[in-house]
Amino acid sequence: MQIIINFLNISSGIIWGPIMLVLLLGTGVYLTLGLRAMPWRQLIASFRLLWRSRHSKDKGDITPFQALMTALAATIGTGNIAGVATAIFLGGPGAVFWMWITALVGMATKYSEAVLAVKYREVDESGRYVGGPMYYIKNGLGANWKWLGIAFALFGMIAAFGIGNMVQANSVAAAMHAAFAIPDWVSGGVMLMLTAVVILGGIKRIAVVAAKLVPLMALAYVAGALWIILAHLADVPAALASIVSDAFTGTAATGGFAGAAVWAAIRFGVARGIFSNEAGLGSAPIAHAAARTNNPVQQGMIGMLGTFIDTIIICTMTALVIILTGAWTSGETGAALSMQAFATGLPGFGSIIVSIGLAIFAFTTILGWSYYGERCAEFLFGIRVILPYRLLWLAAIVIGALGQLEIIWLLADVFNGLMAIPNLIALVALSPVVFRLTQAHFKKPPRE
């Protein structure tokens, strides 16, 4: 077993090393330039479009609003609480700046993913709209590239059980045990029943739950963070200044913080940023492909908001709480650091906010990733695999809640990174299609 763990550790280090981070960032920069920064220029218009899309009657299974909420359900998770804290612990406040950069260029990546997902989606034997990287590889690049789509689907199906299921279930069980002394088996059983009620109803029921739960949980978490930020309002300019300056100078050792070089800020900021918003990994377009829309560009504009909301808003709130309360020098890391920061800022119930927030974030991630994994499995084996897959998914929740997951964490990390490779190849190869569709929509010549 230790040999396997060592191999996975080495593999994870290679896959998530400098080359992958450069590829992910580089693709985002290339697409941002090719789109002439359209995602930044059309940000407000995209929010207006999102609001209007709540009652779309176009062809598809769920509204564009529900598609974004489903994608956010899968995206907003432990990365927003534990991931941000880990980035600051390892890279200092400067890591937050590089998370912002990752998100800003990642908006173009997420936009392109959603555009291609709608452009090349299909209708399966059951009449459902299906799409994502495996479909835009097959239908956009041609039959000779179908093997690359199969690779993505295989990596995605396996990664889903780790990052989207057992890891999340374990996080919920740990949070509930720490905050309320609830036994792990109880948390696992409750999650199994709640998840079964939702996912056995398919994407429409997942989307309905996500559309209600995601905005509620995000607003509640942001409200708690905002309360702490307003209480330390005078210190906010200094905190923001340290984020920017430490991104280029590194962070000196202070308190329980060991200090970090510039490279550490870049490395962990970019890595945690990508882990948080998933831009380039190819997961979110699977949800956007089911949207009721006839316009790939409009769905792309809605899709790119996921990266902005996840990282620029929610992750920034978490980071400011950690920095303003001084908890980042405590020596804690991960969810424990975020919990300590909220407990310091809101004595008595701050840690409860984090515990409940982590539980709800992780639960909705289980819902969103169940759909991602299911679509990947359907691409590989057809619609007959759907029910067995859902039952296996439910069983994995209990295993995750009760298990020691070091090897699962590592497997998830490896296969989650491998998902990005076929997707990035397709994004670059099909970028002229994205630029052309965008040009036609806005009637402005893009840079190709």
Image (cartoon, rainbow, N blue to C red):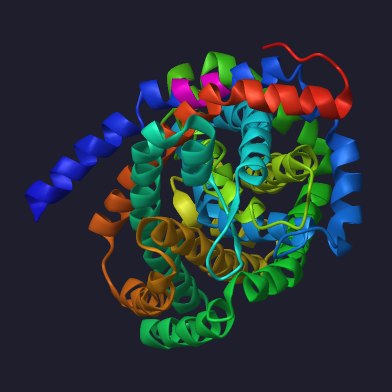
Foreground pick, 123 / 25 = 123
Q: Is residue 193 above or below residue 310?
A: below
Q: Main secondary structure of the magenta part?
A: helix
Foreground pick, 259 / 210 = 210
Q: Looking at this rendering, what residue extends furthest in the top direction?
A: 447
**Residue 118 among those drawn in magenta:** no
Q: How many marks?
A: 0
The quadrant of the rendering that contains the N terminus is: bottom left
Q: Is residue 151 visible?
A: yes
Part of the protein shown in magenta: 22-27
Q: x, y (%) of residue 323?
A: 63, 40
Q: Residue at x 43, y 72 (%)?
A: 386
Foreground pick, 252 / 220 = 220
Q: x, y (%) of residue 326?
A: 61, 43
Q: Residue at x 63, y 20 (%)?
A: 432
Q: x, y (%) of residue 116?
A: 62, 38
Q: Residue at x 32, y 32 (%)?
A: 15
The quadrant of the rendering that contains the C terminus is: top right
Q: x, y (%) of residue 122?
A: 58, 53
Q: Is residue 367 left or right of residue 305?
A: left
The quadrant holding residue 216 is bottom right
Foreground pick, 219 / 284 = 284
Q: Is residue 243 visible?
A: no
Q: Is residue 347 left or right of residue 55?
A: left
Q: Is residue 401 above or below residue 350?
A: below
Q: Residue at x 52, y 79 (%)?
A: 195
Q: Is residue 438 left or right of residue 91?
A: right
